[in-house]
Image (tube, rainbow, N blue to C red):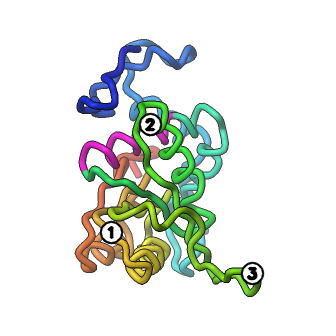
Amino acid sequence: MTREGSQGALRSHHDIILEDYMDIPIGETHRDALKKMIVEHSFQYRDDPPFTLACGEQSHYYFNCKATLLIPEGFALAADVCRDIVLNEFGADGIGGLTLGADPLTYGIAHSAWKLGRIVHPLIVRKEPKDHGTQLPIEGHVSEVSRIVAVDDVITTGGSTIKAINAFRDAGLKVIGAVVLIDREEMNGKENIEELGVPVRAVFRRSEFRINGA
């Protein structure tokens, strides 16, 4: 697949044709192929009883994105799709989020950008600062970052992403956006983040995933 160099504009994930993933039919976009993997490995629907989410609320829909992101192909696809948003729409020099949900995307996007000659520094926000050593709340080269995008795999209430945003701001960084793999469209997660003045770009919305007309 031909890609433009690091000095030119990156092609959107809507336009990129997959020719470097041998098991994916030519003509599918990264996003198409990634959605198929999420449906196969990460998405579940259950009518009764519903799933209990990390926030304590219940839903008929459940996404375990790690089941896709911890497959090499899924990791690479998600990284490429999110990289295009981070670079094309936001022009960030840093990315990161709250461990553990944001970790695969953070590492993947940084590596995917590096392959194109672009440096996007990955940062990891600890749930709690270390109680030993330097006691850093954020791991990574914070001093190299000025404009950061917060990332996460799924947003429900937006709590994990908001915690990361606050940590980045406390470190003096400008948070210019948030990129998430899936917006559950429940419990106002996207709206809660955007109330902080941070625009959210979701690769997928929950309403794109349906089972038996649900």
Dot 1: element: strand
Q: Which mark is residue 133?
A: 3
Task: Identify the residue at horizontal 54%, vertical 60% (top origin).
Answer: 102
Give the amino acid type for the residue marked by disc 3 in the picture: Gly
Q: Is residue 50 visible?
A: no
Residue at which label 1 appears: 175
Task: Identify the residue at horizontal 58%, vertical 79% (top origin).
Answer: 137
Question: Does residue 155 lie above or below 13 as drawn?
Answer: below
Residue 18: horizontal and vertical position, in percent?
Answer: 42, 19
Quadrant of the image containing the N terminus: top left
Q: Which residues are magenta?
A: 77-89
Residue 57: horizontal and vertical position, in percent?
Answer: 52, 79
Q: Nearer the viewer, mark 3 or mark 1?
A: 3
Residue at which label 2 appears: 80
Is 81 in the magenta?
Answer: yes
In this view, the residue in front, 184 or 50, is 184
Dot 3: element: loop
Question: Does residue 180 lie above or below 195 as drawn?
Answer: above
Residue 25: horizontal and vertical position, in percent?
Answer: 46, 14
Local crowd at mark 2 within 10 Å, few (<14), some, or many (≥20)? many
Residue 203: horizontal and vertical position, in percent?
Answer: 36, 48
Q: Is residue 199 visible?
A: yes
Marks 2 and 1, how far apart in space? 21 Å
Marks 3 and 2, how far apart in space? 35 Å
Q: Earlier in the sequence, mark 3 or mark 1?
A: 3
Q: Nearer the viewer, mark 3 or mark 2?
A: 3
Dot 2: element: helix
Task: Identify the residue at horizontal 41%, vertical 47% (top origin).
Answer: 209
> Is 43 placed left or right of 191 in the picture?
right
Q: Earlier in the sequence, mark 3 or mark 2?
A: 2
